[in-house]
Amino acid sequence: MLIPTSETDAAYIIRNAAGQGKRLAICGGNTRSGLGQMVEAAEVFSARGLSGIVDYDPAEMVMTAKAGTPVAEIEAALARNRQMLAFEPMDHRGIMGTSGEPTIGGAFAANVSGPRRFVAGAARDSLLGIRFVNGRGEAVKAGGRVMKNVTGLDLVKLLAGSFGTLGFLTEVTFRVLPVPPAADTLVVSGLDDETAAKAMATAMSLPVEVSGAAHLPFTVRHRFIGGRLPEGEATVLRIEGLAASVEARAQKLAAVMEAFGPVTRLGSADSATLWRDIRDVAPYADGTSRPLWRVSVAPSAGHQLVAALRLEAGIDAFYDWQGGLVWMRMEADAEAELVRRYIRALGGGHATLVRAPDRIRAATSAFEPQPDAVAALSARIRKTFDPAGIFSPGRMSGRGGAV
Amino acid sequence: MQTSFTTEQLADPNVAESEKILRRCVHCGFCTATCPTYVTLGNELDSPRGRIYLIKEMLENGRPADAETVTHIDRCLSCLSCVTTCPSGVDYMHLVDHARAHIENTYRRPLADRLIRSLLAAILPYPARFRAALQLARLGRPLAPVFARVPALAPLAAMLSLAPVRRPRTAAVTDPQPLSTPRRGRVAILSGCAQSVLDPGINAATRRLLTRFGVEIVAPRGEGCCGALVHHLGREDEALAFARRNVDAWIGEIEGGGLDAIIITASGCGTTVKDYGHMLRLDPLYDDKAARVSALARDITEYLSTLDLPVLESRRLSVAYHSACSLQHGQRITALPKLLLKAAGFTVRDPAEGHLCCGSAGTYNILQPEISAQLKARKVKNIDATKADVVAAGNIGCMTQIATGTAIPVVHTVELLDWAYGGPKPAKLATSGRKDKARPVAAARV
Amino acid sequence: MAEAIQFLVPRDNVLARRLSIISDLADLLPPECLVHEARGLAPFETDAFIAYRRVPLAVALPRTTVQVAAVLKYCHRYDIPVVPRGAGTSLSGGAIPQEDAVVLCLSKMTRIIEIDYANRTATVQAGVTNLSISNAVGTDGFFYAPDPSSQLACTIGGNIGMNSGGAHCLKYGVTTNNLLGVKLVLIDGTVVELGGKHLDAAGYDLLGLVCGSEGQLGVVTEATVRLIAKPEGARPVLFGFDTCDEAGACVADIIAAGIIPVAIEFMDKPAIEICEAFAKAGYPLDVAALLIVEVEGSEAEMDAMLASIVEIAGRHGVRKVRECQSATEAALIWKGRKLAFGATGRIADYICMDGTVPLGKLSYVLGRTAQIVEGFGLRVANVFHAGDGNMHPLILFNANDPVEAAKAEAAGNEILKLCVEAGGCLTGEHGVGIEKRDLMRYQYSDIDLAQQMDVRGAFDEKWLLNPSKVFPLDGRIRAAC
């Protein structure tokens, strides 16, 4: 494993590798390497040696850190100033059974987000500026440290979620938000998936600023907060803010939700645990490598997808993002063709194979295959960053793809 | 905006004024959003900003107008919605007036166009001629579809379709009624031209209402068409002649028995009469007199608002208030008519997109029938959506236009007010069969 | 006087074939969708950045994506530059064409295609104005958040091209944070769909890349945007200070206290006078700096947040506090602010700058701005989005005086360089266009720019889309010249 300790170091190594056509498997803490296509590379190239908070100005709500800084260190520094990452990045170690420290660069490179994403934006929406080394070994800067910045092409968005295939992130500047002083969660019990979707849509149409909307069907409900959720399916809605505001909004929301089913409140401690477990897909952190899909569709399509698939395959699923994010664990086979066919039929979206045994990963497109024109465009873009094709080649492509 | 006029060009006071107006425009484009032709056609050239640019080019180059520029200026409704929207205070109204005059003076229109415009200028301002023409129009109505198919004759088709089906009753021109209450004011009411033929009931209602509240009405001899029509056709000399005639008639009365106000019930005319001071500013014999006349001009709703009319109990009749462009944009009167209607006991509803013209715009519905039709359809749709019992407007042009598109009866605001305060129910409502619970004056504050 | 900002030299072979190009375009579009007469082309020669003007070859006003694709495919085949245009309200010259270019104006594509409340999305054609989206969903209790001051007139297509912001972006983000999907036509006529009603990109975030690309990567014909539930209420409050420094420090403190109002706007004395003369909103005329702070939520929530803000303002010597008593009053207060630029036109010509600086540097930059402008013998009025440090100095001058015009431009450039030096950037919302193109090297190295230009080339190898914009003309790769 190669672990550069400076950007110059990294640039030097990459320049040489490009010259020799030597492939590098890019990673941070290597906790998410099971995500995506398998990469054949001569070396693993890690950013964890580039670590440390470079600048943090709580009054400006901006932090700059080297890409290999552990997320835990970032979150601790923020917590000391009562601030947080709005996009609450998921910790993949549970479901993937990996060890190591997830890095902040990895969080942005994989565009890792959590339940609050659907109202507060994804990781990429908090990312303001980056430094990276491209596949020629050149150090490139994009973005800046202010939110309002439309100077030139937005390479920041492009690099986010690119899994290291376009550049080796060395430094990231991102926006942070104050931690809400109070939080609580409403649980509406006993709703089937379709009714839950309606209830969540209704909640989102009210001026109560729900910041988490998930639905935990019967099969997974008991695996949260030590099984203390009320009986039956649980549709959970989070409210955050000033204490008085949370109380008032929770009451307003409860009054409307009561029309759907019995409503209970969790209190702030259980609330925090619950959403962390939803964030980290706790029910499927089962120590196995059974295929796990992360599906993103329109909120009203999520339950339809699951209902359709249940008729044809053995799946276990729960919902986040008002029903638009579906975590699906398959019994044995990934059923990729089936999943993708139904997604298309239901108006579009994408499914990413987050976890699977190696033999399945080798035979399946982990990322949603793109229409030809988009795939061609992506390939051309990649070539402008990495002409020699050394950065985790094939990580994001379909099986046997050109990218 | 940067301009490039020569000193010689600027010696002409009209050009100098237009140059000042052009300098104000910063080309921000806000005006495009509220321009009826821009939202209909989606072309910069049919937006105020585009027209300002075309006018600038035309005047700077001292050229005769060209077909392209004329096409787009002709499509301007002069609704003045852009003036309401403009943050920079561009006096578009006077700029486009100047442009129209320049066009009329320098551009040779195609024959059919010239004929139709001359026809309109020769007939509409003269009530006797207009009445006669309407008789002919009723006979010729079946030919409208034929004319409509020939592009050059489309205006004729539009004219025929707009002519009322039934002959409007001519209201007896009554001598001023003696007052039964102490006199509160002395006013003249513009008799005008087209309105007196199409709907004499409007001024009749105005006279009744004002008399009932102690306002003496005088009818100075010699006043007639305000000149708006020919003014908007760019025929400046004719417009100024009409203006001078009216100014003379009113000055005679002002210096004679005195006038508290010159009441105008057609808001399109009101805007023009209020502009007499500007129109005649270069005439040393009339500049002061015209300014005095303009200062006394009032829309009927403006004047009524000064009378402190009593508040009546609510009657169960909903009114969709159509805000005429000349009233809301030209004269900046937006709330007064609605407040009057509410005080009189009506429930007032605002149609959506109230800032957009109905497409009448003087003779626009005759000269630009396709765009006018699209605007009418849009306006009628918004009005129908209010599900009101009656539509009230302050301008005869709007009333005529909207009435041809909706089943809801259309009346003038003053007709409803006259009815509420003791007058007869407007004829157009009598057929609607609605039962209303009218209550007489609750507390007299006269 | 020679213009400071250059355009690319028009291609002779294209100019020579002008008539046949127009004839070919006339085969692709109905007559009312093509403008080619000299007189008719003039109004398209500029946008809101009126100091620069170039008459285009022709203007296409397509109604459908198919027509857009046909025009692009044709232009691609014959190497004709294309300049996309929305409502032409760009303040950086984004829509200014060149003599050999076809303007592709989407102002006829104004249909709202679908509103989906369950999924909180609206799908519209690119020519739909920003405000009309919020208007269409307002009575049902929703709104579209990014609200540039020109929202009455600017189109969503233009918003996407520039990644437009607005006063309410402090809380809700800018266009790219509220954009879910687009239908994009590439330069060769291929139509692709990026995103949709679902969240996150399937692969590379091409949607994020297209947003803010200033018409250089393709032409957006349809967009799907995020709708948000309207708050129960919103209330702007005016705070008047004796110095700009105190006002700036107050802003920083509000943010530092963990309070995120919906918007914080800043106006200095000259700007206050200009806006008050137009809107008559009741702005105090005897203060040096004014903050408009808007909070939203239920009555109780607004009261609570305002109490905290008033307390913070008190610590900075606030002299006047005025709360809105009615919706009409609130509308007036915002009208005054949003129409500030146009209202400035009542007293002078102006250019409006758009740099962003870190909040902590606001006072410093304001002071230096005043010094710079005074050094050129001109006046300045400041209006800006204080909450995110996005400044809009309005440099006042006389457009009919070429010497003053040149000075104003030079002053503007100095201010933008100052913003970059202070740790900010050249443009917060208006985009680079032509206005800031030649300053790009103040913010980016040659390598940074080369990487961006390479990506641009991946979409448009021949550099036909809006070619004179964003990237400095010198030092471009071969195809870009």
Image: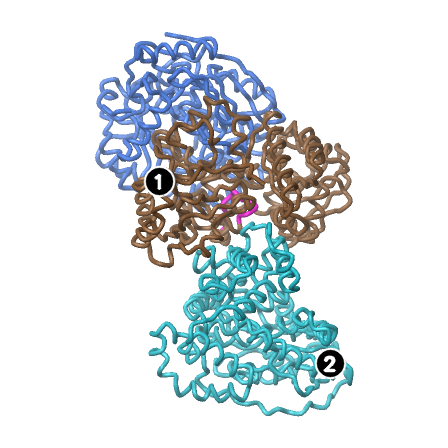
Chain colours: A blue, B cyan, C brown
As for residue A145 lying within the magenta part, the answer is no
Q: Chain of mark 2?
A: B
Q: Is residue C88 above or below residue A66?
A: below
Magenta highlight: main SS: loop
Label 2 CA crowd tier, 10 Å (few <14, some 14–19, many 20+): some
Q: Is residue C35 above or below residue A172?
A: below
Q: Chain of mark 1?
A: A
Label disc, if present, on residue A230 of the rendered structure? none
Place of residue C199 in the rendered image (x, y in percent of width and height, measured from the top left): 39, 35
Nearer the observer, B273 or C34: C34
Q: Amino acid at mark 1?
A: Asp
Residue bearing mark 2: B251
Place of residue C154 in the rendered image (x, y in percent of width and height, measured from the top left): 50, 48
Residue bearing mark 1: A192
- Left or right of C381 on screen, residue C118: left
Q: Residue at x 53, y 60 (%)?
A: B58
Q: Amino acid at mark 2?
A: Ile
Place of residue A103 in the rendered image (x, y in percent of width and height, measured from the top left): 45, 17
Identify the image quadrant of residue A58: top right
Rendered-image quadrant of the N terminus of chain C: top right
Nearer the observer, C265 or A270: C265
Q: Residue at x 36, y 75 (%)?
A: B148
Identify the image quadrant of residue A89: top left
- Are marks 2 and 1 in one subunit? no
Label 1 CA crowd tier, 10 Å (few <14, some 14–19, many 20+): some
Q: CA distance from mark 2 to mark 1?
A: 82 Å
Identify the image quadrant of residue A338: top left
* Magenta region, residue range: C141-151
Q: Is residue A159 above or below residue C133?
A: above
Place of residue C170 in the rendered image (x, y in percent of width and height, measured from the top left): 57, 36
Q: Secondary structure at mark 2?
A: helix
